[in-house]
Image (cartoon, rainbow, N blue to C red):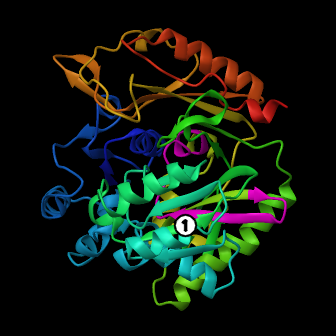
Amino acid sequence: MRILVVGGGGREHAICWALKKSPKVQQLYCAPGNGGIAEVAECVPIQVNQFAEIAEFALDNAIDLVVIGPDDPLSEGIVDHLEAKQIPVFGPRQNAAILESSKVFSKDLFKKYHIPTAAYESFDNYEAALTYLRSQQIPIVIKADGLAAGKGVVVAQSMEEAEKALHDIMVSRIFGDSGNQVVIEEFLSGQEMSILSFVDGHVVKPMVPAQDHKAVFDNDKGPNTGGMGTYTPLPHIPQSVIDEAIETIIKPTAAAMVSEGRPFRGVLFAGLMITPQGPKTIEFNARFGDPETQVVLPRLKTDLLDIFLAAVNGHLEQMDIQWSDEAAVCVILASEGYPGSYPKGLPIEGLNEVQSSIVFHAGTALKDGQVVTNGGRVLGVTALGKDIAEAREKAYADADRIRFQGKHYRTDIAKKALV
């Protein structure tokens, strides 16, 4: 089969890496891809928002399946666009991708269907939002309604910080139209957990759970990023809690979307908090998580293409999806200054010295045959091991072998699992 993956980050590299292992994949393309993806797929210079060009390429190259990686094209309706041209595509339609693209929609859905989540109010008026905010307790969470490249959520530790975040989003409009509305919600404390699931309407097939590290510095300090590292499994979280999250949050959300006339087909990503009252929903994403994908897919034993095809063709219920017992740890190597401004185009050395990890490229480019930095999160170094400790040791050893100016990474990824 001939497959086209849309996207150019670490998540798409992991998807391409997993698809490349399928004996059914004859030709693998990625649009636009990156310096690392070029090693496993043929990169095509088409951007993720160029729907007409993607459709034209798929038709001209007899593509059997298009797999959508990032959130933006999903929210803008790429699946609907391709389906209208009879091109098979894995990912949710625009009316289902709203679960990620509108925080107000998703919070209202949770309330309507009694899905556990943080208490909240939503606002489209700055003065009303500010008045409400000043009546709330600190810490508090401020969320831009729309997509903001993973940076539209502020956990404010003081009222001054909360008011600044609200002003930035609704008045200064640092996220543009994504700040037309905001959600102000209670701060939930506890362990974070991510569960990604393959979904086709009512059918939910959970993947192995993972835990992300959002803050840029060790000990969860500093501003939130798109994710500085992740690991799976979660030995410190009981299976009963994981099962409770699946039964009380993920399956009911899939069923709610069907009830709303927005059946979800694709990967449903639940960002959860394990509170003293049980699992609660932080947010849902409408696609594979980044960097969770970089640890989850290396543990997948079943052919990923078979799963995609089963979901697209309505046979997901019949799939018996198998996972390895190994642990996986991913350490993100970021550019100096991330998540603020950072330099690009810096040469990356030592990739050929990596001994036991898979290196997923998130923000790289090829320049005159040299791999260079091209993003805030540059590389994800993923290692497998018999347990978290072994996987962690391997990942950090290889992270140290890779060199570029200003390289920054957290040194405490997966430490919570070793307590």
- The residue indicated by pointer 1 is 133
Q: Quadrant of residue 369?
A: top left
Q: Position of residue 165 (x, y in %)?
A: 44, 54
Quadrant, the N terminus: bottom left
Using the rendered image of the protein, determine whether residue 268 is visible from the camera's viewpoint: no
Residue 123 part of the magenta segment: no
Identity of the residue drawn at 36% across and 54% down: 168
Identity of the residue drawn at 63% across and 36% down: 220
Q: Quadrant of residue 379?
A: top left
Mark 1: give few (<14), some (14-19) or many (20+) Cα within 10 Å.
Answer: many
Above or below — where is 123 with respect to 302? below
Q: Position of residue 411 (x, y in %)?
A: 63, 21
Name the side, left or right, on which 341 lies relative to 56: right
Name the side, left or right, on which 345 lies relative to 233: left
* Chain part drawn in magenta: 274-296
Q: Position of residue 413 (x, y in %)?
A: 65, 30
- Viewer-nearest residue: 17 or 160: 160
Above or below — where is 145 with respect to 302? below
Figure disc tally: 1
Residue 287 part of the magenta segment: yes
Identity of the residue drawn at 41% across and 36% down: 339
Name the side, left or right, on which 348 lies relative to 19: left
Identity of the residue drawn at 56% across and 82% down: 109
Helix, strand or loop status at disc 1: helix
Quadrant, the C terminus: top right
Q: Position of residue 19 (x, y in %)?
A: 44, 46
- Viewer-nearest residue: 159 or 397: 159
- Viewer-nearest residue: 125 or 210: 125
- Mark 1 is on which residue type? Leu
Using the rendered image of the protein, determine whether residue 228 is visible from the camera's viewpoint: yes
Above or below — where is 392 with respect to 244? above
